[in-house]
Amino acid sequence: MQIYRLPALSDNYIFLLHDAKRNIAAVVDPGEPYPVLRQLRQLGAELVAIFNTHHHGDHVGANADLLREFPYAIVYGGAEDRGRIPGQTVFLRGGDRVTFSDRSGEVLFVPGHTHGHIAYYFAAERSSDPGDLFCGDTLFSGGCGRLREGTPAQMVDSLTQFRVLPDNTRVWCAHEYTLSNLKFAVTIEPSNLNLQSRFAEVWAMRERSEATIPSTIEIEKQTNPFLRWDVRAIQDAVNSRDAVQTFAALRKQRDLFLAIVFSR
Ligand code: ZN
Ligand code: FE
């Protein structure tokens, strides 16, 4: 299975999974039809599945257009998102399984950004290969989704499900937010050497207009403050000794940081 990363809208990524043997494809979170249709045409592949992580327009906006071209495609989404995802036919809960090509994916229920958010984790076929996590707007490289409908406790619980995945798991986040996330992260944990080198590397990549996605679980555990609520330096930065409180304080500071950056 080949994974294509398609830039869409202003800073979204759509992921297209291609099975060359059967010449079928699936997409994760299509916010826009044209990048998907173009790639399908180039491959000559038929779209058989749409995997949605949550109901926001930048993740489901192309469902209807794609269904018009490929009426037999199956639209997957969370059970809690019933009525919010156009064309949805399969209603998934945590622990359910989905398949595409030769890969089997596990559904993780990860509320926080929205109350129905799910993620798809495709374990590797061979243990030496990396698995693939499609996490929507729950985890970003260097950051996490805003709490639009959920609580800090829910988000900590959701991110914990990612933290226990194998280190080499590729993390396919739905937005290119890495650089601005890391600008915030270095203010929280300036002495983290892994974070410093990641920041420099990402800065250079963005200068060259390169994508920073996929990341890996290992990179995120080492550099993402939103997975590091139990690290002493992070807790000190927000004056807390409690995981959920630490996370909540970080998220609040990040929202303020955003407001400052965008008001300039
Ligand atoms: Zn969203
Ligand atoms: Fe989004």
Image (cartoon, rainbow, N blue to C red):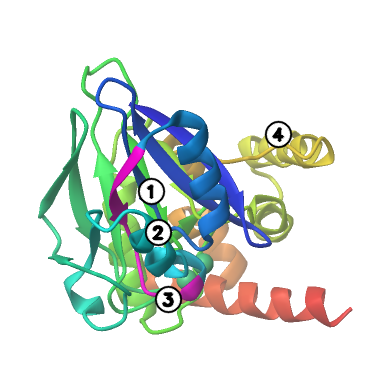
Direction from residue 71 to residue 90 in the image, left or right: left
Q: Is residue 191 above or below residue 242?
A: above
- Viewed as shown, does residue 59 lie left or right of 84? right
Disc 4 element: helix
Query: Label 3 to label 2, Cα distance in Å?
Result: 42 Å
Is label 2 within 8 A of ligand 2 (CB to nearest ligand atom)? no
Q: Verify CB contact (< 8 Å) between mark 1 and mark 2.
A: yes
Q: Is residue 215 visible?
A: no
Upstream in sequence: badge 3 or badge 4: 4
Which portion, as a residue range, is magenta?
A: 46-57
Q: Which residue is at 27% across, 44% downward?
A: 121
Q: Which mark is residue 245?
A: 3
Q: Secondary structure at mark 2?
A: helix
Residue 120: x and y, percent?
28, 50
Q: Which residue is mark 2?
A: 66
Which numbered mark, 3 or 4, is in the foreground of this view? Answer: 4
Q: Distance of mark 4 from mark 1, alpha carbons? A: 32 Å
Please name the amino acid that badge 2 sits on: Leu
Circle 1 crowding by C-alpha within 10 Å: few under 14, some 14–19, many from 20? many
Earlier in the chain: of badge 4 and badge 1, it is: 1
54 in magenta: yes
Spatial separation of the CA atoms under disc 2 and disc 4 = 40 Å
Relative height, residue 125 to residue 253 (above, below): above
Placement of the N terminus among the 4 image quadrants: top left
Label 1 sits on residue: 27
Amino acid type at mark 3: Gln
